[in-house]
Amino acid sequence: MFAHIIQTLPQVLIDGLTLGAVYAIIALGYTMVYGILELINFAHGEIFMSGAFIGTAILIGLTGVGWIAAFPAVVTLILVLLITSVATGFLGMGIERVAYRPLRKSSKLITLITAIGMSFLLQDFVRFITELKNGNYIVNTPSLFSGKVSVSASSLSSSFDDATFKVTFIVVLIVALCLMIGLEIFVNRTKWGMAMRAVAQDPDTASLMSINVNKVISLTFFIGSALGGATGVLFALHYGTIDPYIGFILGLKAFTAAVLGGIGNIRGAMFGGLMLGILEMFAAANLSTITGNVLGAEYKDVFAFAILILVLIFKPEGLFGKAVTEKV
């Protein structure tokens, strides 16, 4: 058993980092909104899904006019990421303005139910539009980067098997790293980032210091949704097939990653996403071996959520979170 785990380790790390990078960026959207409004925005998974569809529609359109054949793939990727990020950023702002802001003074349960309602609304809206155009809600994304790369891990140690990855693996990792580093710099080194941190700590006091709380909250939704939309494009490019329901389970797992790292903590969300992705791929590759073929790779989701439960039992504030005491 141990030998099999070691053999599959290089492939597990590659697949886990790809999936973990996707979880990490989506988790940032959850953790940013929660950090400021203490709202679990369950519609965020569907904003990610909308980004995947918007990006795919742009790619299909560019393919039709011959753009993809004429321009380098990197230029096309940057263009698609920019357009999709802006579109999903405004979508997130619109959802906040229409569905969440009027309920800001209401109980958190009502806002939570509204978020779940928005999630289903977006799913069915995208499904309706896609079926209207294609007759089928499952869509294949045009490929921008083709080819596979082999990693000769066995040359490092005979205990390892060789691994392979798609070229899009490198694209996903580089873009994800740029997005995470960019967000970290924005939040910690800009005036708007300082305003976001001030509103997260105490919105009433922040408003007394001439900070426009509504603008800061709108900006938070814009940035979180733009990141989610860009991640949707990366997901569509890497996995090649999308449908209106990809955001639900993936969003739940990204939320799990945010809780795992300590919801409200940006670095915790990044770490939680990467850790969850690697653990999930580890379970997919080795669960049948560890359990003697009782549980197969399809039970990897159980593994992921079992980890969430364990973390919540022993460290409810998450790995990077701080315990908060409430005064009675």
Image (cartoon, rainbow, N blue to C red):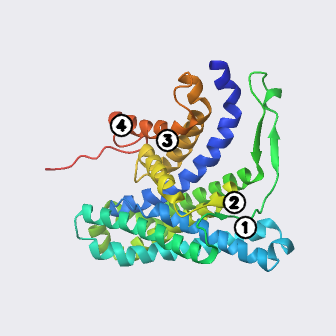
Of marks 1 and 4, the one in the foreground: 1
Of marks 2 and 4, the one in the foreground: 2
Residue position marked by numbered label 4 in the rendering: 315
Label 4 environment density (alpha carbons within 10 Å; few <14, some 14–19, many ≥20): some
- Which is nearer the N-term, disc 1 or disc 3? 1
- Which is nearer the N-term, disc 2 or disc 4? 2
Disc 1 versus disc 4: distance between alpha carbons? 40 Å
Mark 3–mark 2 CB contact (< 8 Å): no
Vertical placement of residue 225 versus 145, above or below: below
The tag on residue 77 is 1
Measured from the top left, where is residue 150 in percent x and y? Answer: 82, 40
Say whether residue 161 is left or right of residue 124.
right
Q: Secondary structure at mark 4?
A: loop
Residue at far right of view: 70
Disc 2 versus disc 4: distance between alpha carbons? 36 Å
Residue at far front of view: 135
Of marks 1 and 3, the one in the foreground: 3
Disc 2 versus disc 1: distance between alpha carbons? 10 Å
- Which is nearer the N-term, disc 4 or disc 3? 3
Label 1 environment density (alpha carbons within 10 Å; few <14, some 14–19, many ≥20): some
Residue 212 visible within the image: no
The tag on residue 301 is 3
Residue 309 visible within the image: yes
- Which is nearer the N-term, disc 2 or disc 1? 1
Of marks 2 and 1, the one in the foreground: 2
Q: Quadrant of residue 285?
A: top right
Residue position marked by numbered label 2 in the rendering: 237
Q: Quadrant of the N terminus?
A: top right
Mark 4–mark 3 CB contact (< 8 Å): no
